[in-house]
Image (cartoon, rainbow, N blue to C red):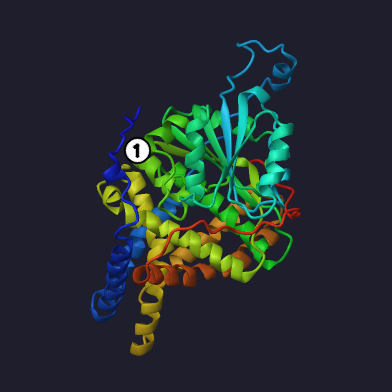
Amino acid sequence: MIEIENFEDDEFCPGYAGRRQKAAITLIALWGGTLALHLSRWGNAVVLFSTALMGVHVLRVLFARPRQTPPPLSGYETYKTGTLRQTDADPWPYISLLVAAKNEEAVIESLVNSLFRLDYPRDRYDLWIINDNSSDSTGTVLDRLAQQYQQLHVVHRGAEAKGGKSGALNLVWPQTDGDLVAVFDADAQVPVDLMRRTVPMFSYAQTVGAVQVRKAIANSSTNFLTRCQQVEMALDSYFQQQRIALGGIGELRGNGQFVRRSALVTCGGWNEETITDDLDLTVRLHLSGWEIDFLAFPSVKEEGVTRPSALWHQRNRWAEGGYQRYLDYWRLIGQNRMGLEKTLDMLAFWVMQYMLPVVTPADLLVATLRHRSPIFAPLTALAVMLSMIGMFVGLRRIQKASVLMTLIRSLRGTVYMLHWLPVIASTTIRISVRPKRLKWVKTVHQGDPHDEFPLDVSA
């Protein structure tokens, strides 16, 4: 068993100070390194050697075998009738469900009703919703629902409240009694058996501190963007499963995350000085010695964005939050606090998702001026290949579709994923030169989305 280490606040919570300087130094180093490789006679050899090393890691990712999901908790029907004895079924841990809601009048009532239809003993879970200074009728709707459901606790935050979503969650979770704390977005569509299937994931080991449920797009049939977001979610699911199977890090995604209470205590709750609370908590958990597992079936559905401008703003937020993890915790990561497998996994992920997009503009510019091909072309090709294979396999794991249709969707998704190049590049440049004030920026939810992929199947 891994010994859980509780870091001191000044070491574990570096805060926002210094991010811009660290981002600027990293940007200068990457662009300077790109120019140096172009001018050096050994530049191509260095890139090819790096590509070969990364290729070994890619092969390990492709051939990793995710472990089987344990069976769901049984005995719910007898529990409801009062005939269940302690030895008849697995234990039912108490779960506190948390939702931070801001201007969610279109979806909040549907979410509350669905969460009280779960096939989990009603006296073994409760629901806490934080109305974060909504300017619409979200608060009124929640107060009415609180009269209907005894286990619903509504907390209202005023305009003076700070910390965004993290602040809202931190306000409530110390008041809860759950052995597990689950977080959902207001637009979540939750299957009735979700908690019965998630709870056994914590039985693998006492060091499993959190479980992330696979996310899917509820309105995937709307347009090209939402169809591609569905493929993107399949790719994310594939990477989650393969990275965990390798001993790398599992990651939280905010919507549909379950956290062991003792793990949350170790980390001190959510960081209120970050844009993406889920990605920040991911690193904190791993640095504290906890594992994050992944549940592929069933999925929690959410609304995908339907307009390019909304997609741009959302992905910029995700990109900045993801990059902040490395800026805040690079020293602890570099000290191998997570263990070798996780450290190497985070390094490989950083190279593919952050380094390559950042060096691409400089690489293309120098290559054009020198009338040469981009020096990072081999490494970029490897990353694109891994992404496309991941989409194909990820889609095959969750959908009943022909090989040809899956291939078409993967090709379409590969083209769509190119939007991450300008997103990552512009985000890293922006945070290197411009200070940013932290605030809660959220995606607008419309409600009543339609399904395109109802044929998700278990592996």
Whether residue 59 appears in this view of the structure is: yes
Give whichever of 98, 82 is nearer the camera: 98
Estimate the x, y position of residue 104 in percent, counting from the top left. 66, 51
Q: Which residue is mark 1?
A: 288
Estimate the x, y position of residue 449 in percent, counting from the top left. 74, 55
Compared to residue 222, the image places residue 129 above or below, namely: above
Mark 1 residue type: Ser
Estimate the x, y position of residue 281 in percent, counting from the top left. 43, 45
Query: Looking at the figure, which quarter contains the N terminus?
Result: top left
User: Does 415 sit left or right of 273 as displayed?
Assistant: right
Give whichever of 11, 143 is nearer the camera: 143
Q: Secondary structure at mark 1?
A: loop
Question: Dividing the picture into quarters, in which one does residue 350 lie?
Answer: bottom left
Give whichever of 304, 393 is nearer the camera: 304
Query: Looking at the figure, which quarter contains the C terminus?
Result: top right
Q: How many marks?
A: 1
> In the image, what residue occupies the spot 64% across and 45% down?
300
Question: Dividing the picture into quarters, in which one does residue 114 lie?
Answer: top right
Estimate the x, y position of residue 217 in percent, counting from the top left. 66, 54
User: Does 22 sit left or right of 211 as displayed?
Assistant: left
Compared to residue 412, the image places residue 116 above or below, namely: above
Mark 1 Cα within 10 Å, few/some/many (few <14, many 20+)?
many
> In the image, what residue occupies the spot 68% across and 28% down?
150
Whether residue 121 appears in this view of the structure is: no
> In the image, what residue occupies the spot 39% across and 46% down?
283
> In the image, what residue occupies the spot 68% across and 33% down?
193
